[in-house]
């Protein structure tokens, strides 16, 4: 008799990720159901959806991400939950939710501002900031109970202030960036988003809908007007002076850079430090200089990708890993699963800071590969250098608190003993 095929596990429920990333279920999917249908029930006050195809093998994830003609970012946008149809024209203005060739035009425009040279000029400030935040947090810990929450005391502020510098947001307004990020990214987690805003029918309003973003877009226009009068060496100055960029496109760029630019490092930084705390031998090898930090950063990104999943929509009938996918059906790639695919990575469940090559997909692939990946890697390297100098070891004082989200691989709290 043939071995029975195991049932398809649920990797949709955001509450699962608040406990741990379901790597065992990912492996089962990769081995037995590489393209698997997932139900989309009503959860966390959000109405049920039509379901989607979960793509978990590395090769299939890359294929979907590279083939924008078949797997569209534009048709239904890029989040698992369907947006309100009335909001789609608005959401599609964002570069993240466009397909080539329109996507390429916007990417070229913003690339003029997001240059490696400008980013490198922030390196000295970012390094000093990392050292100052760490020193302040450790001083408070030594004066108190000997524990420090690296998320609350270091990594949240580090990511936020670096992004604010790059964008050119005045110091007095920087708290707004974190508020908007928490509202948009953390909407599945009550600790981050608070109580949902309900419409007149009692249904929760999508935090990415136009009605919920008017304050952010109004601020973007005010900031752009200020930068036209008082130009500086920052991204918003460049965007504000770009005659090819429409007013609505500038607003959507501000939204994208604020949310994605902040949360990439905000999630990856504590995730990498948690991995090192759980693998003390790896941390000591890194401190001793036996392993190059740049190589280690890639492995920490593989181990803890900041983004768990992204959605596409089939533009026409197609086939993937033997499964028939019909036009209009949702196709969701799972980065965290692709990064542990045994078909690509030797011993993927082992943290190997010297791993090379390391073709992880933590920053995506294809035309939508993360525009700020260079900036993120720079920030992570500088932060880790300062942590390695300041802390002889990383000792967990409590289990980490994880974000309730099937989208962002967030760490809400990372308590360390420093005495």
Image (spheres, rainbow, N blue to C red):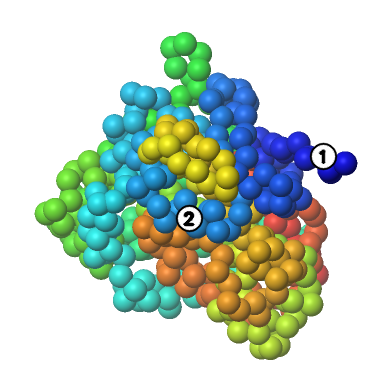
Q: Work out whether residue 338 or residue 202 is closer to the camera in this orientation and state it.
A: 338
The N terminus: image quadrant: top right
Looking at the image, residue 338 lies above or below residue 219: below
Image point (46%, 24%), residue name: 205
User: Camera-side residue: 256 or 235?
Assistant: 256
Give the image location of residue 179, x and y in percent.
Answer: 47, 43
Of pointers 1 and 2, the one earlier in the residue sequence: 1
Looking at the image, the residue that sits furthest to the left is 243
Q: Is residue 48 above or below residue 166?
A: above
Question: Quick check: can you spot residue 157?
Answer: no
Residue 317 is left or right of residue 334, and the answer is left
Position of 264 relative to 300 (above/below) = above
Residue marked by disc 1: 4
Label 1 crowding class (10 Å Cα cut-off): few <14, some 14-19, many 20+? few
Answer whether labels 1 and 2 touch (C-beta < 8 Å).
no
The residue to which callout 2 is attached is: 63
Label 1 and label 2: CA atoms lie apart by: 29 Å
Q: Secondary structure at mark 2?
A: helix
Q: Residue at x 43, y 48 (%)?
A: 259
Of badges 1 and 2, nearer the viewer stands 1
Left or right, 340 with reference to 124? right
Pick whichever, 222 or 304, lies toward us. 304
Mark 2 Cα within 10 Å, few/some/many (few <14, many 20+)?
some
Judged from this view, the residue extending furthest toward the front is: 1
Q: Position of residue 110 (x, y in %)?
A: 27, 59
Element type where label 1 sits in the image: loop
């Amino acid at each position: 008799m043939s071995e029975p095929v195991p049932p398809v596990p649920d990797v949709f429920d955001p509450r699962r990720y608040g406990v741990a990333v379901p790597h065992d279920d990912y492996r089962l999917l990769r081995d037995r159901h590489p393209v698997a249908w997932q139900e989309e029930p009503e959860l966390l006050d959000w109405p049920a959806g039509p379901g989607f195809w979960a793509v978990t093998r590395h090769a299939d994830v890359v294929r979907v991400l590279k083939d924008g003609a078949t797997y569209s970012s534009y048709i239904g946008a890029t989040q698992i939950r369907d947006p309100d149809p009335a909001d789609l024209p608005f959401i599609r203005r964002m570069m993240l939710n466009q397909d080539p060739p329109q996507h390429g035009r916007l990417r070229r425009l913003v690339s003029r501002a997001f240059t490696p040279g400008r980013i490198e000029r922030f390196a000295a400030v970012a390094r000093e900031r990392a050292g100052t935040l760490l020193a302040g947090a450790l001083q408070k810990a030594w004066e108190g109970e000997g524990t420090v929450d690296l998320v609350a005391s270091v990594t949240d502020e580090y990511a936020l202030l670096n992004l604010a510098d790059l964008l050119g947001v005045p110091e007095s307004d920087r708290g707004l960036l974190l508020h908007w990020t928490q509202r948009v990214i953390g909407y599945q987690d009550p600790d981050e988003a608070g109580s949902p805003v309900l419409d007149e029918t009692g249904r929760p309003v999508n935090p990415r809908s136009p009605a919920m973003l008017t304050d952010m877009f109004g601020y973007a226009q005010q900031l752009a007007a200020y930068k036209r009068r008082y130009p500086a060496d920052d991204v918003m100055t460049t965007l504000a002076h770009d005659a090819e960029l429409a007013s609505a496109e500038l607003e959507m760029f501000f939204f994208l850079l604020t949310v994605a630019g902040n949360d990439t490092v905000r999630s990856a930084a504590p995730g990498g430090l948690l991995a090192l705390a759980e693998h003390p031998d790896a941390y000591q090898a890194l401190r001793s200089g036996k392993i190059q930090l740049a190589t280690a950063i890639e492995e920490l990104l593989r181990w803890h990708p900041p983004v768990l999943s992204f959605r596409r929509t089939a533009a026409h009938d197609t086939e993937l890993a033997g499964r028939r996918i019909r036009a209009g059906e949702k196709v969701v790639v799972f980065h965290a699963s692709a990064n542990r695919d045994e078909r690509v990575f030797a011993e993927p469940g082992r943290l190997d800071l010297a791993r090379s090559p390391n073709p992880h997909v933590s920053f995506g692939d294809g035309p939508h590969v993360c525009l700020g990946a260079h900036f993120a890697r720079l920030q992570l390297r500088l932060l880790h250098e300062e942590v390695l100098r300041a802390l002889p070891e990383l000792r967990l004082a409590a289990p980490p608190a994880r974000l309730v989200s099937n989208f962002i691989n967030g760490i809400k709290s990372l308590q360390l003993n420093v005495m």
